[in-house]
Image (spheres, rainbow, N blue to C red):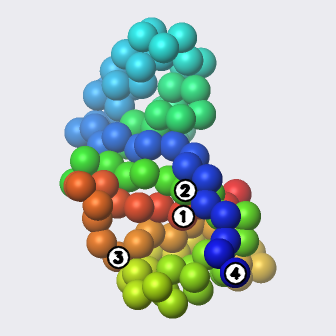
Amino acid sequence: MKPEFTMQHIGINGKDRQEAVEIVTLFSSIFDLELRTEKKGSPFAGACIEAMAGNGPGTHGHIAFYPPDMEAAIKYLEDKGVPVNHGSAKRNEDGSIYVIYLQNEIAGFAIQLINK
């Protein structure tokens, strides 16, 4: 059975925090998105644009997809021959994966699966 994948956000690589804030501020002003820069982590414009300070995975950044069932999604992709980078997995306290990347980039973007 094919799992559901919903695109969640795009992460754009910036060289540092200042550039990351500039990126999301521009998107926020153009599209009237809520500017979220107060947290220590990556700044966001709305829920759809993330800017990575100091560059993140992928040449240009990453595209994040939400699968409601992470384990089923990983199995489905691997059964299709899509390599998953298990070394990139971040886990919850119970051991379940909440973030993982595919092994290969697409058009300079890492592909992230995120379920949190």
Tags 2 and 3 touching, CB below 8 Å: no
Label 1 to label 3: alpha-carbon separation: 12 Å
Quadrant in which residue 12 is drawn? top left
Q: Secondary structure at mark 1?
A: strand
Instruction: Tell me the mark number nearer the camera, choosing from 4 and 2.
Output: 4
Instruction: Tell me the amino acid under the disc marked 2.
Output: Phe
Reply above or below: 17 against 74: above
**Upstream in the sequence, badge 3 or badge 4?**
4
Q: Is residue 38 visible?
A: no
Q: Residues within 10 Å of mark 2 (few under 14, many from 20)?
A: many
| Residue under numbered circle 2 | 65
Reply above or below: 66 against 12: below
Label 4 to label 2: alpha-carbon separation: 18 Å
Tags 1 and 2 touching, CB below 8 Å: yes
Quadrant in which residue 109 is drawn? bottom left
**Upstream in the sequence, badge 1 or badge 2?**
2
**Upstream in the sequence, badge 1 or badge 3?**
3
Tags 1 and 4 touching, CB below 8 Å: no
Instruction: Tell me the amino acid under the disc marked 4.
Output: Met
| Residue under numbered circle 3 | 103
Reply above or below: 102 against 48: below
| Residue under numbered circle 1 | 113
**Residue 16 screen position, x and y as percent:** 28, 37
Closer to the camera, 88 or 48? Answer: 48
Instruction: Tell me the amino acid under the disc marked 3.
Output: Gln
| Residue under numbered circle 4 | 1
- Rendered-image quadrant of the N terminus: bottom right
Label 1 to label 4: alpha-carbon separation: 18 Å
Residue at screen point 32% across, 49% down? 61
Label 1 to label 2: alpha-carbon separation: 5 Å
Q: Is 47 left or right of 96, judged from the image as shown?
A: left
